[in-house]
Image (cartoon, grey):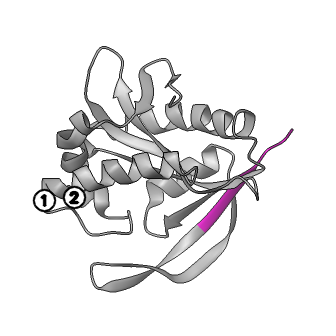
Amino acid sequence: MFPILTTERTILREVQFEDVEQIYDSFSNKETMKYYGQDPFTEKEQAANLINHFHTMYQEKKGMRWGIQLKGQKHVIGTIGFNLWSQKYKRAELGFEIHPGYWRKGYASEVIPEVLKYGFEELKLARIGAIVFLENEASNNLLLNMGFEHEGILRNYMYQNGRFYDTNVYSILNSN
């Protein structure tokens, strides 16, 4: 069963096909996708394919992605989870996005610690990394505030909207 996590204001749960409208709203939004590393969606079928990808990643134990649902509501406002999960090497990369209508309300800083705790305690990860566009000041600052350490810059690491972007590399290590 997919793990359910809770915070003061949110429920982190498996993304379902019933979430296709909200996933499409986020992933077709140019502001959401500005620093995501892929072009915005243009068709709802892409959102359905992404949800299917989330399910496959989890079944194959290569990643897991929670939908961020506000308590008292049914829809998701974004997703958060682990990409490139390697059980053998005990590492994964953190990824997240939140619809701009919910930015600057502290949701990311509320859910990230819960996801990190799950990664370290339940998945027994030794390292959780993150890749962030240099221009994404909000996410760069957020990860530093969450205890991630800046490890360096990957030059021309992402290609989006017809151009290459440099990215910051961050990590946080399991202190146990």
Whether tag 1 and tag 2 are in contact, CB under 8 A, the answer is: yes
Residue indicated by mark 2? 46
Is label 1 in a helix, a strand or a loop? Answer: loop
Q: What's the residue type where badge 1 is placed?
A: Glu
Vertical placement of residue 47 versus 12, above or below: below
Relative to residue 24, is residue 156 depicted above or below?
below
The residue located at (12%, 59%) in the rendering is 43
Q: How far apart are marks 1 and 2 (CA)?
A: 6 Å
Question: In the image as oriented, which residue stretches furthest toward the right?
Answer: 176
Residue at which label 1 appears:
43
Q: Give yes or no for residue 173 being in the magenta stretch.
A: yes
Residue 91 pos. (x, y %): 70, 55
| Residue at far top of view | 72
Q: Specify the quadrant that holds the C terminus.
A: top right
| Residue 59 painted magenta | no
Q: Can residue 128 be seen in this view?
A: no
Q: Where is residue 175 in the image (x, y as percent from the top left)?
A: 84, 42
Range drawn in magenta: 169-176
| One can see residue 59 in this view | yes
State the image coordinates of residue 132 (x, y, percent, origin top left). Answer: 51, 64
Give x and y (percent) for residue 134.
49, 70
- Going by the numbered disc 2, the residue's amino acid type is Gln
Give the class, few, some or many, for how many residues have Cα within 10 Å of label 2's Cα (few <14, many ≥20): some
Q: Is residue 126 left or right of residue 67?
A: right
Q: Residue at x 14, y 53 (%)?
A: 44
In the visual, does 7 lie left or right of 124?
A: left
Vertical comparison of 113 with 44: above or below: above
With 13 as the anchor, is 109 left or right in this view? Answer: right
Query: What residue lies at 56% left-to-right and 54% top-to-bottom?
Result: 62
Q: Main secondary structure of the magenta part?
A: strand
